[in-house]
Amino acid sequence: MVSVRGDQRPGHRPADASLDGASADASAGELVAQAGRQIGELVRQEMELARIEMAGKARNAGKSAGLFGGAGAVAFYAGGALVGAAVAGLAVVWPVWAAALVVGVVLLALAGVLALTGRNRLDRATPPAPAAAAASVREDVHEIKDHLHRRHSR
């Protein structure tokens, strides 16, 4: 599994490390370069988080599609059973068609449950936008703004 936060290389400072510990004798150019590296790392981490979140949503949408397919198959067999019930009803007076009718109704009820379950799962999978990654980016932007405000108010 990919580590979303931080890098394990020796001497590498994670993007979310505080800038307050920066050396007092560092030049403005060095500080800008360091901020650029940290922002780049932060962007890469946020993109990885968004990719992971999107993959989870795609898996959920695939399972929902499978449930809809299952509902269609069960509805197809229910239709066959209802057709069989109609034929049996015409051929014989009660017992055979009544049994086939009950089976057909039960299969249609099962198809309805599968369809509703699939729809509910699909509703949870949409919209496919990475909400957690977007919230994390907003939090990062707020943190950077606060840090810059504190640096300039000194």
Image (tube, helix red, strand yellow):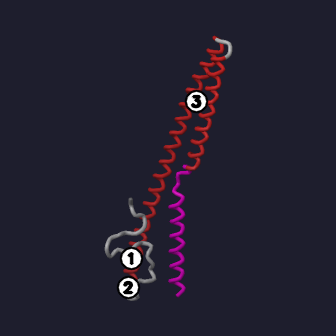
Is 140 part of what is drawn in magenta? yes
Between discs 1 and 3, the one toward the N terminus:
1
**Amino acid at pointer 2:** Ala
User: In the image, which is nearer the foreground, mark 3 or mark 2?
Assistant: 3
For the residues marked 3 and 2, what is the alpha-carbon distance in whole angstroms?
Answer: 72 Å
At x 32%, y 76%, the residue is 11
Q: Which residues are magenta?
A: 125-154
Is 131 part of what is drawn in magenta? yes
Q: Are marks 1 and 3 in contact (CB under 8 Å)?
A: no
Q: Classify the position of the N terminus by image quarter.
A: bottom left
Q: Are marks 3 and 2 in contact (CB under 8 Å)?
A: no
Asked if residue 76 is positioned above or below residue 8 in the image, the reply reads: above
Q: At numbered mark 2, what does the secondary structure look like: helix, strand or loop?
A: loop
**Amino acid at pointer 3:** Ala
Position of residue 18 measured from the top left corner of the image (x, y, whole percent): 45, 78
| Total numbered labels | 3
Residue position marked by numbered label 3 in the rendering: 75
Between discs 2 and 1, the one toward the N terminus:
2
